[in-house]
Amino acid sequence: MKVRIDGFHVVNTALLVLFAAVVFYPFYYMLIYSLNVGEKATSNLYLWPNDFTWENYAVLLRSPFILNAYTITVLRTVVGTAVSVFFTGLWAYGMADSRLIHRNLYKTIATVPMFFGGGLIPYYMLIRELRLIDTFAVYIVTGIYVIWHMILMRTFFQHLHPALEESAKIDGASDFGVYFRIIFPVSMLIIATITLFTAVNHWNAWFDAFNLVNDPALHPIQLFLKTVIQQNIGIKNLVDSLMDKSLDAETLRQIEQIRVTNESLKAAATVITIGPIIFVYPFLQKYFVKGFMVGSIKG
């Protein structure tokens, strides 16, 4: 049996493999850099650590800041995602109902902010008047409604068969009953997609904390990473700032022995920060792909 080799597919596959390697290698290099002794990380470090060590992570994990930042980020992601999906879904269900009075007006009001914003200063003044500055609630309240997610969910709801809602109404179900008992269960594809989008946005967010939260105890992990990367002040001062206390002679001696450097600490902090998203993304990638189509065409 002769196997026919298509030249186009061979070239296409080779290019895709090369492209995947180019995209993947920076993440892999960051990982092996973080697992290498800092002083030796710049010499012949290509495919694996040339002097393996866990000490870059050990120094970071001794910091009370990173554990607190992880806790804030996890809480923000879980609570913020649940609240946003719940209220955005209710909004989308209402906007999908053709009986809604002045629906086109509401649609226009909702669409305008997607293209025009008031600016950072008016936004800050609004958050200040709402007394959300330096509170955990600022992460949740400001992300309750996402207009683009509402549009995707509304379009999906409009494509559901009207008989689903009509049969429930005949049985005496209220609008809330129809949504939670009928619409929500049959819309798990769009719900899962929006949940994933929202969770990733919350995990990666740092700009709102940078502008609206001054208390370090409320800073998320991404802002912690930004702080570590920007501190080009020498290894002693960097570690000292991470520990939030003066380093004793014994700790300094241990740091000198393990030869941790600024760059190796930054690499370890980057891996710790992006690790969860990089780990779960391959298993959830299909939802990202479907999310761009599910709210646009009838499936």
Image (cartoon, grey):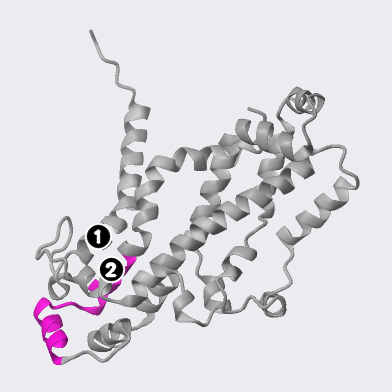
Please, what secondary structure does the residue beneath circle 1 have?
A: helix
Residue 85 as seen in the image, left or right of residue 112? left
Vertical relation: 269 (above or below) 91: below
Locate the C terminus by quadrant. top right
The residue shown at (36%, 64%) is 273
Locate the N terminus by quadrant. top left
- The kind of secondary structure the magenta stretch mainly shows is helix
Mark 1 and mark 2 in contact (Cβ < 8 Å)?
yes
Q: Which residue is mark 1?
A: 31
Vertical relation: 77 (above or below) 179: below
Q: Amino acid at mark 1?
A: Leu
Give the magenta range. Answer: 249-270
Residue 266 as seen in the image, left or right of residue 71? left
Vertical relation: 73 (above or below) 285: below
Q: Nearer the viewer, residue 176 or 193?
A: 176
Q: Earlier in the sequence, mark 2 or mark 1?
A: 1
- Residue 267: mark: 2
- The residue carrying pointer 1 sits among few (fewer than 14), some (14 to 19) or many (20 or more) residues within 10 Å by Cα, namely many
Q: Amino acid at mark 2?
A: Ala
Residue 34 as seen in the image, left or right of residue 281? left
Q: Is residue 265 magenta?
A: yes
Residue 10 as seen in the image, left or right of residue 253? right
Q: Is residue 44 magenta?
A: no
- Residue 129: mark: none
Vertical relation: 131 (above or below) 137: below
Residue furthest to the top: 1
Q: Nearer the viewer, residue 48 or 101?
A: 101
Residue furthest to the front: 172
Q: Quadrant of residue 29?
A: bottom left
